[in-house]
Image: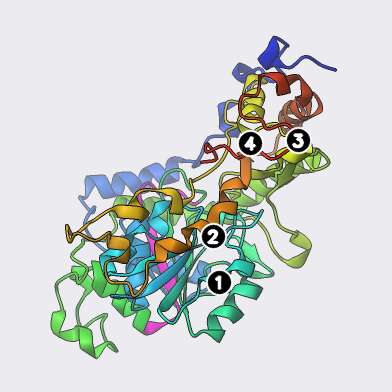
């Protein structure tokens, strides 16, 4: 046995010797700086010319007919809800483990969020999907979480069976492939964040893509007053009287500084993310035989891949490590020198007070159910198993450096192979069973 650093042993990794460039993102070059300076020097922040160029380029890259840039991903997702006609009394299904911006804004439309369980890939569980469907269901919010593509082969037939709209949240999955096809091209509409920490990072930016002209026009009218006019709104007759006002009461226009950066980032995105995949896949190859850790990655032989591997994670099974909690495991890995190892991901939304009793309109009724025909909160208990699906983060390498990657893998291996040293001090462990603590978020 080798003494773990958390208990006084020598750490595997000397963080001061690791090149900062190995993890730095996005990659900014003189080309990025020049286009940014052009916007600054010529006061182009609030125009649309650069944004229009990026939209065309992104639509072609994504493989969709139309693209609209927004100020952030949440605005784009909100516009997507309006695009598919989400309205008063409707229900929208969403996986419970995701960022709140995937579905919280449903209350703005008088709609109710209904939560679906996740599976051990942290993705929407298609086996639980039909349980969530009622006559009031309007749409499914499919979240390709932590770059892992949802099982669209199962989800899309269910959506078709019940005539449901599908919105894809691609905020974690830019460029991710599912069996030879990019995510974001399956649903009626897709939306995504491009904020500074995403795998496609362009400051603070959002994007909506669709092949449906009606969805495109509705999304444009929702948050783009300067483009809610006859040049863009051509088929939605019911919207034409309302030109020149953003119908959602929000100004969703992108800042062109971000659009300019995004154009440059797009040019190199596929090349740079290919190297990320090479590095992360090599790391996963080195730890894939370890009990307790199950890397979240796809079978590339099927034509799938993980895009930019946004926040690599492993599904963590404490039962395989004598009940060792994910919290203690990550603490031990951090002690070995990788400070970025943390337990969990986003909390399960059904557990948050916002979805229990928040009254946005001061109506005396929780906004989630204000216009609902039933109390959808009564089904939240059916998502309890999602609270006991654990994960831990893995290094998000931006470059392939064989020796350093092997060093990080050695740190994870050391903790797994010597995990029994941690059991006595693990306050969150349950002997002989899975840890059911609350800090899984």
Q: Which residues are magenta?
A: 200-213
Is residue 369 a member of the stretch shown in magenta? Answer: no
| Residue 389 spot, x, y in % from top left | 62, 48
Q: Is residue 173 visible?
A: no
User: In the picture shown, does residue 193 fall above or below 429?
Assistant: below
Is residue 203 a member of the stretch shown in magenta? Answer: yes
Mark 2 vs mark 4, CA separation in Å:
33 Å
Mark 2 vs mark 1, CA separation in Å:
10 Å
| Residue 364 spot, x, y in % from top left | 19, 59
Q: Which mark is residue 432?
A: 3
User: In the picture shown, does residue 330 fall above or below 77?
Assistant: above
Residue bearing mark 2: 382
Q: Which mark is residue 131?
A: 1
Mark 4 vs mark 3, CA separation in Å:
29 Å
Q: Which mark is residue 395?
A: 4
- Mark 2 / mark 4, whichever is N-terminal: 2
State the quadrant of the N terminus: top right
Pair 2/4: label in front: 2
Residue at image position (72%, 66%) is 303
Which of these two is toward me, 115 or 151?
115
């Amino acid at each position: 046995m080798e003494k773990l650093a958390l208990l006084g042993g020598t750490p595997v990794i000397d963080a001061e010797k690791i090149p900062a460039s190995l993890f730095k993102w996005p990659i900014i070059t003189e080309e990025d700086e020049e286009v940014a300076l052009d916007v600054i020097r010529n006061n182009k922040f609030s125009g649309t010319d650069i944004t229009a160029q990026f939209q065309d380029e992104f639509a072609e890259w994504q493989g969709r007919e139309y693209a609209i840039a927004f100020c952030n991903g949440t605005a784009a997702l909100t516009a997507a809800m309006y695009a598919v006609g989400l309205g008063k009394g409707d229900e929208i299904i969403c996986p419970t483990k995701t960022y709140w911006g995937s579905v919280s804004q449903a209350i703005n439309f008088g709609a109710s969020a209904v939560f679906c369980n996740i599976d051990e890939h942290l993705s929407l569980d298609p086996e639980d999907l039909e349980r969530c469907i009622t006559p009031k269901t309007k749409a499914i919010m499919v979240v390709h979480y932590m770059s892992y593509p949802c099982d669209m082969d199962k989800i899309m037939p269910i959506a078709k069976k019940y005539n449901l709209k599908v919105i894809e949240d691609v905020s974690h999955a830019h460029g991710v492939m599912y069996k030879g096809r990019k995510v974001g091209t399956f649903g009626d509409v897709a939306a995504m964040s491009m904020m500074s920490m995403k795998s496609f990072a362009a400051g603070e930016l959002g994007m909506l893509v669709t092949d449906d002209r009606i969805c495109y026009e509705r999304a444009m009218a929702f948050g783009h007053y300067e483009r809610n006019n006859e040049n863009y709104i051509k088929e939605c007759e019911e919207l034409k009287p309302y030109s020149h006002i953003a119908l959602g009461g929000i100004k969703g226009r992108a800042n062109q500084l971000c659009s300019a950066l995004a154009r440059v980032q797009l040019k190199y995105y596929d090349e740079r993310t290919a190297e990320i995949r090479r590095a992360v896949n090599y790391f996963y190859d080195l730890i894939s035989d370890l009990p307790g850790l199950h890397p979240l990655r796809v079978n590339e032989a099927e034509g799938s891949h993980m895009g930019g591997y946004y926040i690599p994670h492993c599904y963590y099974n404490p039962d395989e490590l004598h009940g060792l909690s994910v919290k203690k495991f990550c603490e031990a890995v951090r002690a070995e020198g990788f400070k970025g190892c943390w337990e969990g991901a986003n909390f399960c939304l059904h557990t948050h007070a916002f979805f229990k009793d928040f009254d946005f309109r001061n109506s005396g009724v929780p906004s989630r159910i204000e216009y609902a025909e039933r109390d959808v909160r009564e089904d939240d208990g059916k998502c309890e198993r999602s609270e006991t699906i654990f994960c831990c983060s893995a290094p998000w390498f931006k470059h392939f450096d064989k020796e350093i990657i092997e060093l990080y893998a050695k740190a994870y291996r050391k903790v797994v192979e010597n995990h029994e040293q941690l059991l006595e001090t693990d306050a969150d462990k349950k002997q002989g069973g899975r840890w059911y603590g609350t800090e899984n978020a």
